Image (cartoon, rainbow, N blue to C red):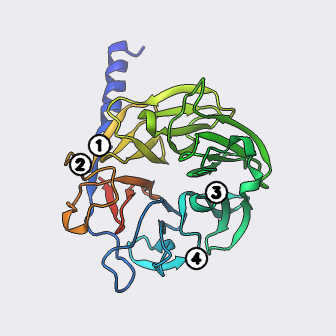
């Protein structure tokens, strides 16, 4: 018969070991910008990793010939620029029916695109597909989208009035929920993601204006407040195993376990005027210290890459120890 104390001790030891394994080391100067440039260019978007380990970073234009989405190899060296819309604000790379696609919210055009990784757009959800009575005074301000296991596409109006729209795989409107009223009272829900760490999958919402992260079921019902204490305006998220990393635009990257416990805090910036702004110049950047985290991704090995809201463009990397 197993001794209950031994069993408890073993569980605590395993838990301590698991937490001890969640450690990261800053990797300086990982990204090599396009030839002839010191930085990658105006950033106000997202970063994602494909199955081959390549990184995709959205960069604004139109004055920048490398605007759209820049592709970098696993070694951080620039490969090419994809001529995708330069106001692509939030995007994910997801497999659909055996192929990888980029699903993105085009902020400046109030539409959603599905594109092959060579930039060929194979499907779009135009402004006209959204219910007209859910647009705010300034129209739709779509900030991110993700794809559920059944192929449904979830889109958030995060710079508008916080509705979450659901479309089927073909782009046909199905339903809408959320918004600023009861029961969720969303505010600047900057980006949403489908959290497949759970069964069934659920929505993880970076409810930035309320400085909290929510879990919703796929019908839009509140499951729980996943995190809120100590957050610095959560703006984006990425998953790896049981972990989620969060880009916090007010000066931090954090990592959380499946139970909603924070297990790492990275790049913390407490300097006044250097966070939640795109205007910090390269001369003021500090190695390993963020300014305004806006997009984030785990790579396939569990390393973290973060891209910032920054006029010059900045990507930081932390390697898993």
Earlier-in-chain disc, 4 versus 3: 4
Name the residue that disc number 3 marks: 110
Residue 80: x and y in percent read: 49, 80
Q: Report whether residue 302 is seen.
A: no
Gap in angstroms between the C-alphas marked 2 and 1: 11 Å
Q: Compare residues 127 and 184 and report the one nearer the observer.
A: 127
- For discs 2 and 1, the disc positioned in front in the rendered view: 2
* Residue at the image point whose x is 44% and y is 46% from the top: 235
Disc 4: which residue: 83
Considering the numbered disc 1 on the image, is that residue within a helix, a strand or a loop? strand
The residue lying at 60 percent from left, 46 percent from top is 157
Cα distance between the residues tagged 2 and 4: 33 Å
Asked whether the beta carbons under mark 4 and mark 1 sit within 8 Å of each other, the answer is no
Q: Is residue 25 above or below residue 8?
A: below
The residue tagged 1 is: 265
* Viewer-proximal residue among 185 and 120: 185
What is the spatial separation of the Cα atoms under label 4 and label 1, in whole angstroms? Answer: 35 Å
Q: Where residue 319 sits in the image (x, y, percent)? A: 32, 57
Label 3 to label 1: alpha-carbon separation: 34 Å
Q: Earlier in the sequence, mark 4 or mark 1?
A: 4
Is residue 176 positioned above or below 114 on the image?
Answer: above
Find numbered disc 4 in the image and state the secondary structure of the residue it sits on. loop
Q: Is the C-beta separation of discs 3 and 1 under 8 Å?
A: no
Q: Nearer the viewer, mark 3 or mark 2?
A: 3
| Quadrant holding the N terminus | top left
């Amino acid at each position: 018969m197993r001794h209950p104390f031994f069993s408890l001790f073993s569980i605590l030891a395993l838990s301590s070991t698991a937490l001890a394994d969640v450690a990261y080391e800053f990797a300086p100067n990982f990204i090599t910008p396009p030839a002839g440039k010191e930085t990658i260019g105006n950033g106000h978007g997202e970063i994602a990793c494909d199955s081959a380990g390549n990184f995709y970073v959205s960069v604004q234009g139109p004055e920048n010939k490398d605007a759209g989405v820049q592709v970098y190899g696993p070694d951080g060296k620039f490969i090419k620029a994809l001529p995708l819309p330069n106001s692509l604000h939030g995007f994910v790379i997801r497999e659909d029916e055996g192929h990888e696609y980029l699903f993105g919210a085009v902020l400046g055009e109030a539409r959603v695109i599905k594109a092959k990784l060579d930039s060929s757009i194979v499907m779009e959800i135009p402004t006209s597909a959204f219910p007209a009575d859910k647009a705010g005074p300034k129209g739709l301000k779509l900030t991110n989208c993700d794809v559920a296991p059944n192929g449904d596409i979830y889109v958030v109006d995060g710079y508008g009035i916080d509705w979450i729209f659901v479309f089927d795989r073909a782009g046909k409107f199905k339903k809408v929920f959320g918004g600023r009223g009861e029961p969720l009272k969303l505010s600047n829900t900057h980006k949403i993601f489908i959290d497949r760490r759970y069964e069934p999958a659920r929505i993880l919402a970076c409810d930035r204006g309320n400085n909290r992260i929510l879990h919703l079921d796929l019908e839009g019902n509140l499951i729980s407040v996943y995190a809120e204490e100590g957050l610095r305006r959560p703006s984006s998220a990425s998953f790896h195993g049981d972990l989620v990393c969060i880009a916090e635009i007010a000066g931090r990257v954090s990592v959380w376990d499946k139970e909603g416990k924070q297990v790492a805090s990275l790049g913390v910036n407490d300097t006044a005027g250097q966070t939640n702004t795109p205007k910090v110049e390269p001369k003021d950047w500090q190695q390993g210290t963020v300014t305004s985290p806006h997009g984030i991704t785990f790579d396939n090995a569990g390393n973290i890459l973060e891209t910032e809201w920054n006029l010059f463009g900045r990507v930081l990397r932390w390697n898993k120890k």
